[in-house]
Amino acid sequence: MKIFLDSANLTEIREAKAWGAIDGVTTNPTLVAKEGREFFPLLKEICGVVQGPVSMETTCRDAEGMIREGRVFAALDPHIVVKCPLTKEGLRATRQLTNEQIRVNVTLCFSASQALLAAKAGACFVSPFVGRLDDISGDGMGLIRDIKAIYANYAFSTQILVASVRHPMHVVEAAKLGADIATMPFAVLDALVTHPLTAAGLDRFLQDWERLPASAKTWKTAEPSARDTR
């Protein structure tokens, strides 16, 4: 499963990229606004760091506006993926942009029927919001299971991008169900790698190493033999 970072913070993105942990980034107007930067230069810089899909959301409600914005975003960098909401107008925009060979991430998906229509419209990605469903006593992972089954039945190429990820178990469950991608805040990504037993084990190993006498910790390089012609 691919992992995307849900962020517009370059410090977080560079850190996660340095771990070899992320394959792409998802952003939205809220995340971009937090950075206090000019929009297009920031988006361009994110693309340069990630070198993978970077989703940016349109800010219009009508299809014509989404299409217009989508063309501008796509022209900025080849890594850009245009985000359109799962509305009638969003589906219209998705169909048109897809026809123009512009990749679309259909976002704000909350039902299997919506996901079916996103795939029919030609979406490259569909983003079911599992955390927001769980927040209202829905079954976020049940939705992923249903979408996975529907897409498998008809060999849709649309990738399932699990969004609104709240904690590591959302990521683990998404991976067990065979989701293509999970996007998450940096705090969740950090929690994936952190475990108290790992920290305790490392502390124990290093403490034991410090107990060894200095002579036992001297590194020696073997002298090459006379026959060694390397």
Image (cartoon, rainbow, N blue to C red):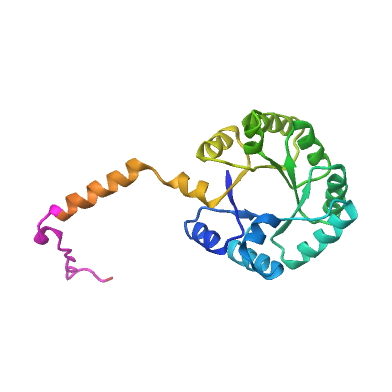
Tell me: 82 left or right of 137.
Answer: right
Q: Quadrant of the C terminus?
A: bottom left
Tell me: 124 left or right of 183.
Answer: right
Above or below, 6 against 69 in this view is above
Q: Is residue 58 magenta?
A: no
Magenta stretch, main secondary structure class: loop
Do we see residue 92 in this rendering?
A: yes
Q: Is residue 214 magenta?
A: yes
Number of callouts: 0
Where in the figure is residue 219, as x and y percent of width and height? Answer: 18, 63
Above or below, 139 against 92 in this view is above
Where in the figure is residue 66, as x and y percent of width and height? Answer: 84, 55
Q: Looking at the image, which is closer to me, 109 or 71?
A: 109
Span of residues in magenta? 211-229
Tell me: 14 left or right of 116.
Answer: left
Q: Looking at the image, which is closer to me, 39 or 221?
A: 39
Residue at (12, 54) in percent of width and height = 212
Do we see residue 55 in this rendering?
A: no
Q: Quadrant of residue 36?
A: bottom right
Residue at (90, 55) in percent of width and height = 64
Q: Looking at the image, which is closer to me, 178 or 167?
A: 167
